Image (cartoon, rainbow, N blue to C red):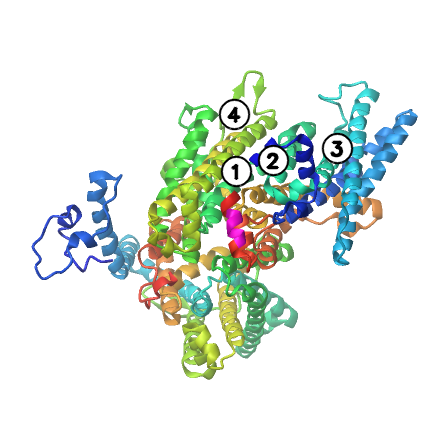
Amino acid sequence: MTDLAVRSPVALLRRVTQPARSMGRRVEGRSVYLILTLTAAGLVLLGWFLPWFVGPFTAGTGFSPQDVVSSAPTGFATVLVYVMGASALIVVLSPLAELVARLRKMTLGVRVDQVRAIAGAAGLVAAVLVYVLVGVIREEPAFGVLSSTTITNSAVWLTMYGFGVALFAYGAKGLVLTRPNLAFAIAALPFGALLPLMFHQAPDFLLWAASSLAIYTLLALGLNVVVGFAGLLDLGYAAFFAIGAYACASLSSPIHGIHLPLWVLIFLGAAIAAIFGALLGAPTLRLRGDYLAIVTLGFGEIIPDLATNNVFNLTGGPNGLPGIDQPKIGPVDFGTSPQWYYWSIVAVTLISVLLLRNLQRARVGRAWVALREDEVAAAATGINTTTTKLLAFAIGASVSGLAGAFYGSMLTAISPDAFQFQVSIAVLSIIVLGGIGNITGVILGSFVLTFVIFWALPHAHEWSATFAHNFNVSAVGNINFPQYTYIIYGAALILMMLLRPGGLLPSRARRIELQTGVESESLAAVQGRA
Amino acid sequence: MNNETEPAAEPAPRAVGAQVATPYRLVSEEGLAPRAPTGGGAAARRVLPAFRAAYGFTSQYFPAILLVAIALTILGVYHSGGLTLMGQQVRNALVLGAIYALIAIGYTMVYGIIELINFAHGDVFALSGFYAIVIAEALGLDKLATSGLGGLLVALIVLFTLSMIAAGLTGMLIERVAYRRLRDAPRVAPLITAIGVSFLIEGFLLVFFGPDNVATNKANWITGNAFSAGGVAVGFKDIFVVGIALVLMFALGAFVRGTKLGKAMRSTAQDRAAALLCGININRTIALTFFIGSALAAAGAIVYSINYGDVQWNLGFRLGIIAFTAAVLGGIGNIVGAGIGGFLIGIIYVFGGSLAGGEWAESLIFAVLVLILTFRPVGLFGIDVGTRA
């Protein structure tokens, strides 16, 4: 990267925007490119049609960006509508065009990318103008609390973000193809950070983001250390989550009269979970692969059972522990505004990601890789397999302790039901879906799976009811969607393992393992940049 | 464990490397001893050998320790409830154990032949229970079975045949779709698809049959008491359950030992590549193994639904883990061991639950699972499977 930095800005720009072929580097980011383009198309579509789906069920009238602008009395707005419509068409259709081109074994020229990038930029500008116009028409501030316009707001934000992603994916195609993880981080970070702002009038969505997306991302990052880095299949990960949550709940609720602040508790929870991780990991040290999985599964079943049976009168039995404290910082009350939980967890997640990345590249991380590939050979090269394994368990568990501390405080009450086997499988599915061992992939997988399971399925009923109402198909209207959760987990696990064992975004090592025949060259790539 | 080379009573000289006069040894003990932990200090040096000795002792005498614990539990139940309670619990344990044994055999056969923990096996069991319901309803077997002894026999034969075939075909389908392609992949990969299949089956059962208990309408198929001894009433149902399990197990044993296909299964389990070289159709043999294992699970499911009267969509999950514990207890890959393990687990479940309270019974089994795998992964009478565990 140093050579890149000292060159002129023009050269830098060219390097970022040109397709990778001219750079003489192996193209690795096709899947990220695909994901970004599909995401852009999906977001634009969703923004356009969101009011149509959700509209009839909310008090506020449903608007799409188009409706908003066409109701504005100026000719300028009509132009905006056409610009947005044309851009949206290009953004939505271009993944299809690319698919057709790939099927016919053609390559799209650089010019096409430029056109698409321009379309994305035009759409983005138009969407921003629409956003401002919404404020102007309603004589309300562009940023801040609007009343009864949830749908409009969210729809415009989604459209805006979709165009932004399209601009980035097509405009900086070179960067996306050569540095997929960085590109993904650039595209996802603003979305992750601004999520509560975009949907600040949809409390449902905020709650989902804080209690499902953020928590499961943390959990998946922790399990990824055990499963992805060290290659130890842990089927009882929810146990550590439970231990962290129960420990923190006991220390910040009226049960024992102890009220520690959350910011102390997250460290305490992490430490306690780490200790238990090492303790429960100890019996599994001599086991390999599937036996280890079963032992951890046994622990994962015992811990919620202990909680249900109210062991030592500490856990409150099946009802769990109620009345957990919620922090208050000055005017910000976490209990009433879950976005602060969300931001806190995002901050913790970011720090964890940085630490885990460093750990992955450090001596311990390389020891984990060696252990994963061949335990005997690793031991022969002087790696202390005992401490290395225990460290993986402890570090993996500590991350779930963080999640547990937040989880209890956010829901103000915890019960054994929240830590059943299903949770372990959800986290495992996230990792398998996203890409075992790849932090970026895990975050993507967490977003996809929690969105489908915890947001789309519970809300699918409303959409299908709209659909049934609009098209007069009554059969679609009364499907109980959440009961398909298990089928989705199962299908995700089977299909991913069979068709794409590396996950949506395979880690570099995994990708190299899967591509045989290019080992020496790829190994150099790993050593150079891993 | 290498404490045979040296009496466990004096580990200290070895650790500090004191010169013991051993003129007949060419290599000094010091050089062979594991490197002393650098950071741990004296505490680690003193604690670790003791820990290791305790571990070695436990793993060596694990079967004896477990059997003594079981005997003490039975005595405890006798002490608290007298002979009648003990007798009733023995009956319950045998019935439960027979069902566990039938499921455990499926686990152990599949593990023996492709070294895969077929996580979906428990759910195949639950699915078979629902197959039995659907088949009995479609053919009107429930009415036939309660009409008389002849009708009952016909209904049982039809139900067992059809359900076992259906379950066996399901097992073959699962193997074909989810496991065959991953046979040479890292061992964790097929385990993950197995979990996926398990969730898929549970999901379908949930969607089709709902979240509540489903009555099997078979609880009244077999009624009446056969005999009663010392206040313990033993029903025809109990004899039927245990009898079916024993008959099927011995039939399976005879099949594996006596037939050509059984021979093919044994050789495939021993060395797949060599079996292939001998002209054995590996894929067909493995599919057959899945067929038999799933069919036995179906038999277990029918017996279960006659005995307990209802089934649930997620019945297979915990029952599956318990049956797997039975398979591990008997030494995984060992069919006779799985049968005995099933009955032992039945005893532990019933008597442990009776002594500690029913809500602890499952935790107890999971604890036994963890203990076996920690101290003696080869099982009670396990053949040495080396690096398998």
Label 2 is placed on what type of residue?
A: Leu
- The amino acid type of the residue labelled 1 equals Leu
Q: Which residue is mark 3?
A: A160
Please rate how many residues cluster around mark 3, counting C-alpha atoms within 10 Å: few if below 14, some from 14 to 19, many from 20.
Answer: many
| Tags 3 and 1 both on a single chain | yes
Nearer to the camera, B312 or A236: A236
SS at circle 1 = helix
Label 2 to label 3, Cα distance in Å? 31 Å
Q: Position of residue A507 (x, y in %)?
A: 55, 48
Q: Which mark is nearer the camera, 1 or 2?
A: 2
Q: Nearer the viewer, residue A94 or A415?
A: A94
User: Is label 2 on the same chain as label 3?
Assistant: yes
Within-10-Å neighbours for mark 2: few <14, some 14–19, many 20+:
few
In the image, the segment drawn in magenta is: A521-526
Q: Secondary structure at mark 2?
A: helix
* Disc with the residue nearer the chain's start (1 vs 4): 1
The percent coordinates of residue A504 (x first, y second) are 61, 49
Q: Which residue is mark 4?
A: A326
x 47%, y 25%: residue: A263
Q: Quadrant of the N terminus of chain B?
A: bottom left
State left or right for residue A79 relative to residue A502: right
**Chain of the residue displaying label 3:** A
Q: Amino acid at mark 3?
A: Met
Q: Is residue A312 visible?
A: yes
Q: Position of residue B319 (x, y in %)?
A: 47, 58
Mark carried by residue A218? 1
SS assignment for the magenta stretch, majority: helix
The disc, 3 or 1, on the residue closer to the chain's N-terminal end is 3
Which chain letter goes with mark 1?
A: A
Frontmost of labels 3 and 4 is 3
Name the residue beneath numbered marker 2: A4
Magenta stretch contains residue B373: no
